[in-house]
């Protein structure tokens, strides 16, 4: 887990908490694996710890509306040994190139991934959906929009984040589900 090279927005690390997570959590996991008769209880404990790691006011604006769905998705990922998947929109605001707030946000997301990885070694996978369609609706040229998102994509790649464009997703969806033609005059 690295940080982008942007000194003014480096986030601090609480060394006490990092040491606690490193030493205590793995010991607890091994204890549960060896002594828990129900594997579901083991998964429930890990899933609850994963949710607690990011379901704090550091990473949310309000309470999740469906904690059971959240638990279900995370449980499935843990049982399959896959990263916890997060899919996030990334909009193109008034900036024409990556700036301080963008770097700060990428570091913030990296902190979230880091918290999860301290509990669940497989960690989390971030996918950013670049909202090129919204930028177009707001009057930004395709060239300016792609330049900005390309800069964000290069920085996000340092954290192994995936990305795609909303326009591509919409286009693929339209190809999968073509709009039916209007009924003939005879039918009407």
Image: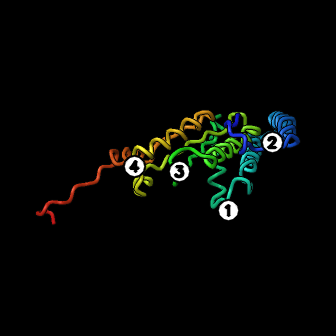
Q: Position of residue 117 (x, y in %)?
A: 72, 38
Q: Nearer the viewer, mark 2 or mark 1?
A: 2
**Callout 3: SS:** loop
Query: Residue beneath label 1, please?
Result: 62
Q: Nearer the viewer, mark 4 or mark 2?
A: 4
Taking the spot 81% from the left edge, 37% from the top edge, the residue there is 29
First along the sequence among labels 1 and 3: 1
First along the sequence among labels 4 and 1: 1
Query: Residue beneath label 3, please?
Result: 95
The residue lying toward the viewer, choosing from 106 and 59, is 106
Q: Nearer the viewer, mark 4 or mark 1?
A: 4
Residue 123 has which mark?
none
Query: Residue beneath label 2, please?
Result: 13
Q: In which quarter of the image is the N terminus?
A: top right
Q: Gap between marks 2 and 1, in whole Å?
A: 24 Å
Residue 152 shown left or right of residue 185 in the figure: right
Mark 3–mark 2 contact, CB under 8 Å?
no
Mark 3–mark 4 contact, CB under 8 Å?
no
Estimate how packed mark 3 is, as few (under 14), some (14 to 19) or many (20 or more) residues with alpha carbons within 10 Å.
Answer: few
Q: Gap between marks 3 and 4, in whole Å?
A: 13 Å
First along the sequence among labels 3 and 2: 2
Estimate how packed mark 2 is, as few (under 14), some (14 to 19) or many (20 or more) residues with alpha carbons within 10 Å.
Answer: few
């Amino acid at each position: 887990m690295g940080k982008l090279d942007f000194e003014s927005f480096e986030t601090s690390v609480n060394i006490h908490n990092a040491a606690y997570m490193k030493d205590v959590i793995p010991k607890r996991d091994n204890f549960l694996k060896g002594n828990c008769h129900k594997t579901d209880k083991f998964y429930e404990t890990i899933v609850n710890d994963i949710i607690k790691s990011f379901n704090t006011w550091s990473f949310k604006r309000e309470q999740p509306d469906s904690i059971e769905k959240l638990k279900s998705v995370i449980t499935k990922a843990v049982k399959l040994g896959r990263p916890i998947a997060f899919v996030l929109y990334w909009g193109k605001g008034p900036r024409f190139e990556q700036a301080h707030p963008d770097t700060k946000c990428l570091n913030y997301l990296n902190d979230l991934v880091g918290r999860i990885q301290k509990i669940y070694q497989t960690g989390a996978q971030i996918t950013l959906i670049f909202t090129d369609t919204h930028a177009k609706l707001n009057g930004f040229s395709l060239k300016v929009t792609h330049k900005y998102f390309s800069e964000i994509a290069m920085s996000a790649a340092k954290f192994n984040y995936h990305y795609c464009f909303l326009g591509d997703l919409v286009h693929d969806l339209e190809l999968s589900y073509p709009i039916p033609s209007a009924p003939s005059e005879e039918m009407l």
